[in-house]
Amino acid sequence: MMIDHPLLGPRDAAEFTYMGDAKLIDRPDWKSENAAQEFYDYGYLRDNPAGWHEELWFHEAGDRSWLVVTRNTITHEISKVELARDVARARGRSK
């Protein structure tokens, strides 16, 4: 499988490490009224979809960047690859 890195171009997936669901970018607010339940859900509950899914990948054997890869879990087709920092900023995360 090839991952088209936004900065470095096409790379073999062997250079990367799969790190899980991209929802990990959306860390809950520890000040919220339901913080305990939200952090439990965040830490332990994961979707296991068949089809299109946003995933976190770490470029371990390269520039050590984090990517959000939109991939079909059935066909392994990749429709989009973005830097995780850009995705986080677009979702309102400043750090």
Image (cartoon, helix red, strand yellow):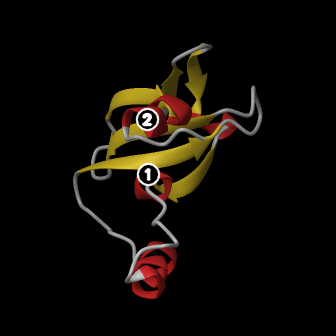
Identify the residue shown where x is 38% and y is 81%: 33
Seen in the image, is 34 located left or right of residue 68? left
Instruction: Name the residue rendered at 53%, 38% in the picture.
Output: 94
Secondary structure of residue under mark 1: helix
Label pair 1/2, CB-CB below 8 angstroms: yes
Q: Nearer the viewer, mark 1 or mark 2?
A: 2
- Which element is circle 2 on? helix
Q: Nearer the viewer, residue 2 or 29?
A: 29
Image location (x, y in percent) of residue 4:
49, 21
Can you give x and y, in whole percent of width and height, for residue 31 in the image? 49, 73
The residue singled out by tag 1 in the image is 22
**Which residue lies under the disc numbered 2?**
87
Image position of 57 (left or right of 71): right
**10 Å crowding of disc 2: few (<14), some (14-19), many (20+):** some
Question: Counting residues from the N terminus, which is met first, the one under dot 1 or under dot 2?
Answer: 1
Name the amino acid type tagged 2: Val
Quarter of the picture containing the C terminus is: top right
Q: Residue at x 64, y 40 (%)?
A: 16
